[in-house]
Image: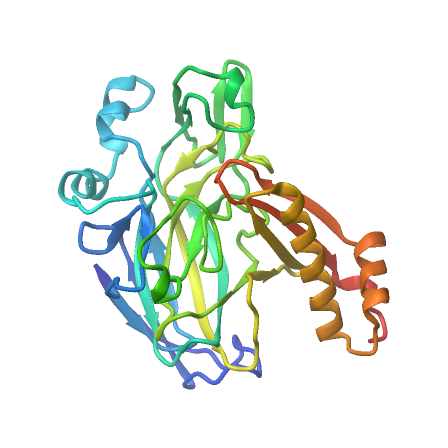
Amino acid sequence: MANFRGLLICSLLLSAHASPSALCAEYTLMPSPATVHIGNFNAALKPVLTINSGDIVTIETAATAIEPEAIDQSGVVQPSVVPDYTRAILREVKDRGPGRHILTGPIAVTGAVPGDVLEVRILAIDLAVDYGFNRQRPYEGALPDEFPRYFERIIAINREARTAEIAPGVVIPLTAPFFGTMGVVPPPALGRISSGPPGVHVGNIDNKDVRAGTTLYMPVHVAGALFSVGDGHAAQGLGEVDISAIETGLRGRFQFIVRKDMKITWPRAETPTHWMVMGLHPNLEEAMKMAVRETILFVAQRFPKLSREEAYMIASVAVDYHVTQVVDGTKGIHGMIPKAIFVSQ
């Protein structure tokens, strides 16, 4: 259910480019059979919540693609740690696929129209449940021919210590959880698409650098944008090479702003110290080329006194390119452009 939680004076929270009302509402959106969709992004989806630009929503997400019975029978955690909403969703939601992700939403943002940009400020992310899991499916991942067997491990999460012991003597810090999948719906002509590969709608980018404190920018393709989120990751390495992270349920606090002054084709993001560009392509080399082109375009647009050749030079000497993930069909590269180097532009 979506719950109204009051109004905030948010003029100080918003950039000068946004034009929300002076008062911003705050909502809570919990997962339930009525507030999730499974495995797809689709312009025909109906919003489960409608908000205004500038509003803040706390959104909880269910752990993706694992049956509660597997948790119950694992002996790793008590069955009581599985939220009732997870059991209800998997019992009652029959319209699924072609992907596997349980996505909370979509949320419509009033005033967003095709050609706009939806700015999503990730204000906070918290662990929502006491368990996670890692799964390997046969002949998938970065080494498909070398791992032909199914593997699944249920993992207890210590939310107080923010750690998880994933194997005997191997303890992983859970200090920067993030949502693997955040996106808007694609253009209507694409129809119902899988939540698996990322794309122009953003979706399953599995980018560990898009975490609390980061702002994500997404091109809008339909009225309202229709934002959904899920695929919570307690921890993940860049690459996500065995096809999954520590998959879990998360709770995030987001602020949504409609940007009329921005025009982008592919997603971008911003941290306190870096601007982030992304390359998404089935071929990793092409994803890299795309990320470099996006770097050049970003630098040239933001600093018009610099030539394309100078922007290309900056990409080479100052920008770090990371392999985001290689297991979602469409592979990802993201480039981190340091803000500090632009001292007099």
Please give the name of the residue rendered at 41% of the width and 85% of the height, measured from the top-left corner.
Answer: 21
Residue 102 falls in image quadrant: top left
- Residue 238: percent from left, percent from top: 60, 38
Please give the name of the residue rendered at 69% of the width and 52% of the height, measured from the top-left corner.
Answer: 289
Task: Point out the image quarter for the N terminus.
Answer: bottom left
Tell me which colouring the rendered structure shows: rainbow
The residue at the far front in this view is: 189
- Residue 263: percent from left, percent from top: 56, 75
Please give the name of the residue rendered at 45% of the width and 22% of the height, measured from the top-left corner.
Answer: 139
320 on left or right of 278: right
Number of numbered tags placed on the structure image = 0
- Residue 274: percent from left, percent from top: 69, 59
- Residue 122: percent from left, percent from top: 49, 59
Placement of 285 over or under 135, stated as above or below: below
Q: Is residue 344 visible?
A: yes
Please give the name of the residue rendered at 27% of the width and 32% of the height, measured from the top-left corner.
Answer: 81
Placement of 151 over or under 259, stated as above or below: above
Placement of 300 over or under 269, stated as above or below: below
Q: Is residue 273 visible?
A: no
Looking at this view, is 163 or 44 the one in front?
Answer: 44
Residue 22 falls in image quadrant: bottom left
Looking at this view, is 215 or 304 the one in front?
Answer: 304
Task: Point out the image quarter for the C terminus.
Answer: bottom right
